[in-house]
Amino acid sequence: MNIDYSKELPIVQGRLSLGELEDLIAKPMSEKPTPKYYIALAITLTLLMIGATSLGFTFYYGTGVWGNNQPVGWAFDIVNFVFCVGIGHAGTLISAILFLLRQKWRTAIARFAEAMTIFAVMCAGIFPAVHTGRPWLDGWLLPYPNQHGLWVNFTSPLLWDVFAVSTYFTVSAVFWYIGLIPDFAVMRDRTTGKVKKFLYSLFSLGWRHSHRNWQHYEKSYVILAGFATPLVLSVHTIVSFDFAVSIIPGWHTTIFPPYFVAGAIFSGFAMVVTVLVFVRKVFDLENIITIDHLEKMNKVILATGMMVGYAYAMEFFIAWYSGVQFETFVFINRAFGPYAWAYWIMVSCNVIFPQFFWFKKLRRSIPVMMVIVIFVNVGMWFERFVITVTSLHRDFLPSSWGYYVPTIFDFGILIGSFGLFFTLVLLFVKAMPVVAISEIKAVADGAQPTHHGGDH
Amino acid sequence: MATKEMSYVKKELPGKILNIGIALLAIGLIVGAFGLLLDPTRAKFSYLLGFFYLLTIGMGSLFLISLEYVVNADWSTPIRRIPEFFAATVPLFIVVAIPLFFFIHDLYHWSHTDAVSSDALLKLKEPYLNITFFVIRVVATFVIWALYYFFIVRNSRKQDETRDQKLTKRNIVASAIFIPVFAITITFSAIDWMMSLEPHWFSTIYGVYVFSGTMLAGLAATTLAVVLLKDNGYLHPKMTNDHLSSLGGLLFGFVNFWAYIAFSQFLLIWYANLPEETFWFIDRWEGMWGAITLTLIVVHFLVPYALLLPAPAKKDPKRLKFAAVWILVAHLLDLYWLIMPQYHGEKSGLHYILTEFGFPIAAIGVLIIVFYFNFKKHNAVPVGDPKLDRGLNFRL
Amino acid sequence: MERNTKLHGLVALFDTPDQIIHAAEKVSHSGYKDFDIHTPYPVHGMDDAMKLKPSKLGYVTLVFGLSGAAFALLLMWWTMVVDYPMNIGGKPFFSLPAFIPVTFELTVLFATLATVIGMITFFFRFPDNKHPLHDTPYMQQVSRDKYGVFIGASDPKFNAKEVRALFESLGGKQISEIMEFEKTWQDAFNPKFIGILVTTVILVSGGTYFTLNKLLYITPFNWMEHQFRGVPQEKSDFFADSRMMREPVAGSVARGHMPYEFKDSVAQPADPLENPLVNSAEVFRLGQKKYLTFCSPCHGNYGDGDSRLNQQFPNPPSLHTAKLREWKDGNIYHVITNGQNVMPSYSHQMTVKERWAVVSYIRALQKAKNASETEIEQFRKENTSNGN
């Protein structure tokens, strides 16, 4: 297939008019849900209930029902936490970083990815909150003047996490909401239902599409994108600090911050592709979320997958080069010790399978990309598992060696987090426009004046 | 389209530029040679500094080209020739590096077999840190870089005449393959040339750190040249300040990226406080090095950050020019901070310090001379590139 | 209540972005100030066409971002250095590298929230769902795919005819009037608004109270407050006799307790104990203190038996009788310890040492009352010769 490099690829295919675009995106919200939707919702709610039950047991009996024990004191909780936060990062990357890089194709997927960010961070929040043991006292994590006369420890990376994740959640939610305001106004002006009209009016705050507002609005969008970009880096960097500021071999290595960020984007893109493939099919959005967009995301997956591979290689090389025997031991133990199975799942899923994306045909094939992105999701979950568990399970003394086995409650909470995530996704696609209506209109063919500002 | 067709007309640079380049090269070499007489070991370290300054600017530019192809960027197409001209220094690396092979025993502790035999750690690293393997790695790296450079530049120039879109496609494929190769080669170049100056020290992020500086150096050099050439009408007349804004934005981004990587490396080592890692930073904190480290933070991060933060600054040619020069100087300071603390010389004095900048000045001279001749021989705008029109019409 | 309406402004619709840019240029060029362009998405080049000044939103961000950073650093400095300094990992109290992450996060949080809240409230004057343009056919079309221009009636240049002519000359369609309700003073006392305000106040303050004082409250050292312990004089569920105060085990001896061999013997012992104390100012002071507390109420301040209880009670005897002066120290001690006649035992009120001190003091009183002239002379001499 020959590409004409002198022309830009159209963002929207099928030459849809502005009104047609709007109708297409607004359709799921004006129609009654089909039985299929209810079946899907029933499945995700079941998963959610499994998680809720497991959490109930954890609340009642304490974290002792988990598999964590000496020497593996951190296990599924932190693995799931890092995994969920990582998934969230793709949303911010698409909405903020690609915006700053002026990648117009982001428009079609930004809203959806941002929503996934928020839901993923909500899921992520469960794990550290429960792992504190007495989650009802988690408010103590915040520094407020209290009758104990105590303050939180600002030099602890776990506290940095509290600030990073809560700031990340707040800023992502605000960013998302700012993007939604004009769309709520569009929905307000389209809808006929009284309740819907009231709700959309309430959330649109009275937006009037005035250009005097658009001017500040665009400025605020640039500012928010400018802040969200370093923020997203900082969040996974701080998550990596949870491990890397310690002196545990396998955790203490300087490449962790960029390596974690790359891994987060990698897994996040994989999750976005996984879900988008269904969404574009179910809601007939193939002309808006085009195969070109999916291909671009697959390229990002390939690139970030190789960055992650680079980090694996550097860790191994430096573990040998450093001459620190503990460091060397941990890495040999990772690859050939009792958890070798997890390690090789990680390497094959994260480094080997994405290599298929070198080929254009495979990048553009929906079934192939589905298989690969699911492998990537699995692989990235195992990456966190490998980092956490294999570094801990053999302590410095052989007397404190152990083998971590998760319990049914560990799995239950993991399943529940997926249940929460997909339940929220399902509710979202029915309640709000999954594509930013005003943004997609702005990049449609013929939407912008033919003579640019500076030319005359 | 526009009423009257504005198109690129090739203009030649005044010979003054060449004279400046030759003068800088001569001054640099003379000062450097003087340094060799004063304090030979110190001068050899400063030769490495000059060499790496050249290498990072050249490789940063080469990487910019490959990045443009891979991400299919259009805004940078009208200015792609500028990094191509800077990257013309890449094939020269092997020549410039020859003296370093003779300096190897003065620079690298691990090259002494007697030192290795009495040091358990060095003995362990011997399979990697030995002269034969070092030379093989270095030469192989330079050859790969040069091959890629020749391939991509030949296609780019051929396109000026043929306007064949297949050439773009070939360059995209080559660049996609080159980027992972570049990641590995720049990392091991950094480890080989600079990190192994202190063979006991190690850091997994080191390659990324040097990459961030390399990228910044290539960008700053490109920005400076683009602003100067555009102001004087050497580039395509349809280029606007919006193109500059992209360069400014990237500069700003990579200033932050450098700070992020540098801070990550420092924080993790400072926090864990393991003696096998901290001594490297202690070397850069004791005595006058503390002042240099603090200066580096100000010069390499705070000042360029403040300079490039406002949106208008990224578009303004004057401010951009200043920021680019500033960053080029800051990058030299960064390399100085990486390399020179490893030289534990006793002699001190202003003239010793001044001679250290001889070879970096010579490196700038080399860059200017190479740039001049390439500019003379080739179009400064890739007139045959299919993305050129798209790039020229780029607006914010 | 019937409300009056008046003209808010005139609107016209256009079909293409080129037309609206042209219209915006013409309208702003004609000198109108109170005009606006409504488009379903931001149209490029409109800022210039409308002659808008660059948005000042960035200054809000800058100010609040810097405040966020300053707040974070000050908070950490005050908590970690001033209020509760702790040695953590041997790092300095003010560990700047470790403070960078939180400083960064708070900078971002302050800057973004301030930008968004500032934009919505001060720049947009939102929420505003009662604007005259809402629910007009005009708004519904610019919300979808049309481009609208509006000129307000409050503009000093506004003239309905001229504006209509201008719109027509630009090719505007569906030119129409927008009406608005006149504002009245009651608007500020809208019961809905007051209700929302009150509800918000109650929810916020109640929520804060509940979170801080109930949910997150923990009494300091609750493991001490709730431990099992015996309270004297209280009922016990634990002991069979339901008394919390326990008898000592039979035969137990208190620490430092010295048994008195003539305990409870009414008759004076034939061979009483010797006073173990050596006379000293300290002993006399102690004896005086105890004597004045326990003995003087009956025996009088100087042992004359002349206290205010005289004549109201069996008269307490004087301590200066010949019988008492001839008693050995042990006899007096015996009486204090065991009591005599109506005098009770003072062994619970005074320790052994204190009782002996009282004995010494009584001896001193007796001496003072019966001293000879020469002894007094002697005493005075000694005191003056000491230089006092």
Image (cartoon, rainbow, N blue to C red):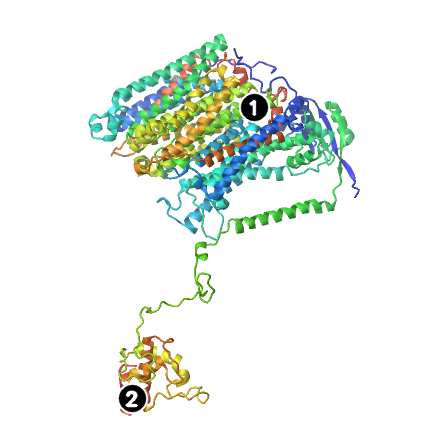
Q: What kind of residue is marked 1?
A: Phe
Left or right position of A210 against A145? right
Residue C54 seen in this snapshot: no
Task: Indicate which disc residue C326 carries.
Answer: 2
Left or right position of A160 against C4? left
List x then y, in percent, for residue A386: 40, 30
List x then y, in percent, for residue B368: 39, 20
Residue C7 seen in this snapshot: yes
Camera-side residue of A372 and A192: A372
Examine the image and state in which quarter residue A260 appears.
top left
Q: Specify the quadrant that holds the N terminus of chain B.
A: top right
Label 2 residue SS: helix
Q: What kind of residue is marked 2?
A: Glu
Q: Which residue is mark 1?
A: A278
How far apart marks 1 and 2 lie (CA) works out to 117 Å
Tell me which chain the residue with mark 2 is part of. C
List x then y, in percent, for residue A337: 34, 29
Tell me which chain the residue with mark 1 is part of. A
Q: Specify the quadrant that holds the C terminus of chain B.
A: top right
Q: Residue furthest top?
A: B162
- Above or below — where is A376 with respect to A213? above
